Image (spheres, coloured by chain):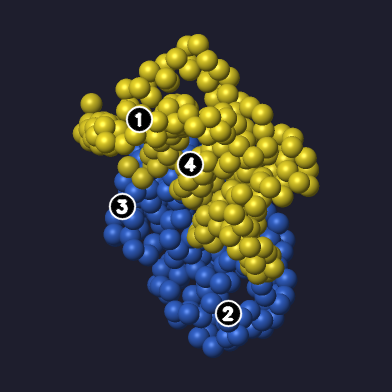
Amino acid sequence: MPPRLVWQALSLLLLAVVWHGAALVAPAATLPPPLEVGRALVVAVTQGDLLRHLGVTLARVGAAFVLSLSLGTALGVALGRMPLLDRILDGWVVFFLNLPALVTAILCFVWFGLGEAAALAAVAVNKIPSVVVTVREGARALDPGYDAVALAYRFGWRKSLVHVVLPQLAPYLMAAARSGLALIWKIVLVVELLGRSDGIGFKLHVFFQNFDVTGILAYSLAFIVVVQAIELAVLAPLDRMTRAWRG
Amino acid sequence: MADAIRARVEAKRYGGKLVLAGLEIAVAEGEFVAVTGPSGCGKSTLLAILAGLDRHFRGEVQAPGRLGMVFQEPRLLPWRSAAANIALAAPDLDAAAVEAALAAVGLAGQGALYPRQMSLGMARRVALARALAVAPDILLLDEPFVSLDAESADLVRRVVVADWQARRPTVVMVTHDLAEAEALAQRIIRLSSTP
C-alpha cells in the first residue's frame, strides 16, 4: 500500500478513536459511538431505503455537476478571452459568488415550484460562478504562441479546442471539477432538505425531526464514502492522466 | 512568374510605437527571399503579418498558399509527442511519413519524445519537420538557425535548401545574419531600424 494511503487510513482510524472517546462522555442520544453508527449503516443498506435515496441524490449531484461544469466552463473561457465581456459581467460573477446557497434554493423553489428543475437550477446557480472564476484564470493564462501555431497550421476551431485550448485548461478544469464535486453535493443536500421528498437531504430532515442522530451520521457517512470513491476512482486518475505529459 | 505573396503595410504599431510603415513586398512563386535588419526593426512582426497571424495593422496581405512556419521558438505543443506535433499539423500523413519527416531532420526513431525531453536544437528540428511535413506552398522561417550548434545549423540549412530545390516553395526567411542571407536567398530585403 502506498505510504500516503497508509497515512490516510491511520488518520481516519484516529478520527474514529477520537469520536469514540467523545461518545463515551457525551449523552448517548446526541453522539452515538462509531460502531453503533456502522451497525445502523449496515441495516439502512440491507433493510432500509438508503440505496434508493443515495441513488436519487447522486443523480442530482451528477446532473448539477455536468450542468455547472459545462456552462461555467463556456462562460469562463468567454470571459477569459473577451476583456470587454469580462468587464461587463464581472459584477454579476461577484454578486452570484456571494449569494448564499440557501437563498438561491428558496428563491428557485418560490419562483419555479418544488420541482426537479428548480432544485437543479438552485445548485447550478450556486456552483457556476466559482467554475467561471477558476476557468477564467485558465483562459487568461492561455499561451498566444500556441494559438499562432493553430492558426498557422489551420487547425480550425474544433481541433484548436481539443489539442491546444483544453490541454492548457486541464489543470483549471480539474480544480473546478474537484472543488465542484465537494461543493455540489453539500448544496444538493440543502436543496433536498428544503424542497424535495426523496434523497439524502430529505432523509436527514426526517432524522432531524425525530432527533435521530445515529441515522443522520449513518446517512452522512454513506454519502461521504461514495463521494470519496468518486474522487479516488474517477477524478484522481483523470487528473493524473491530464498531467502525464509533464513527466 | 506570378506573385505568391503580396503585402502592403502602411502602418503597424505596438502600443503606439510605429514598428513598420510604408512597406510593400511582392515575392514570386518559388522565390527564396531573406529579410534582414537590426534587432527590433520588425522582421518577426512582418513574418507574422505575412502568415496572417497579426491582423492589427493598416494595409493588406495576399498569401493564399498552404503555409508552413518555423517560429523563432520551437512552439511545439508540450503535451504532444514529436510525432503527434507533426501529425497534428499534417493530418494527411501516416505514421511512416511522419517518421520520414523526423528522419529528414536527423531525428529518426525519436517520434515518441515529448518536447520537455528534447534539447532546444532537437525541438527546433522537429519544428522544421512540422513545417515541411505540410508540403507548404509558402515557407516562413523566423531565425531558423539561431541557438543551434554548428552541426545542427548545418543540417537544418541543408534540409531547407534541399526542400526548396526539390519542391520550389516560396520561402521568406527572417535572419539577423547577413552572411547567411546572402548564402541562401535569391533576394534580400533589408529593414531599417526606424520605419
Question: Which quadrant of the rendered structure holds the N terminus of chain A?
Answer: top left
Kindly identify the amino acid type of the residue bearing the numbered disc 4: Ala
Question: Which residue has dot 2 on it?
Answer: B14
Residue A182's mark? 4
Chain at numbered mark 2: B
Q: Please, what is the three-letter code of the amino acid marked with disc 1? A: Ala
User: What is the letter of the blue chain?
Assistant: B
Residue at the far front: name it: A27
- Disc with the residue nearer the chain's start (4 vs 1): 1
Q: Which residue is mark 1?
A: A28
Q: Are marks 4 and 2 on the same chain?
A: no
Residue B171 lies left or right of residue A78; in this view the side is left
The residue under label 3 is B119
Which of labels 1 and 3 is toward the front? 1
Tell me how far mark 4 sits from mark 1, CA to CA.
Answer: 30 Å
Element carrying mark 4: helix
Dot 1: what SS?
A: loop
Please identify, in this view, whether the residue under mark 2 or under mark 3 is nearer the observer.
Answer: 2
Query: What is the x, y in percent for residue A71?
Result: 65, 47
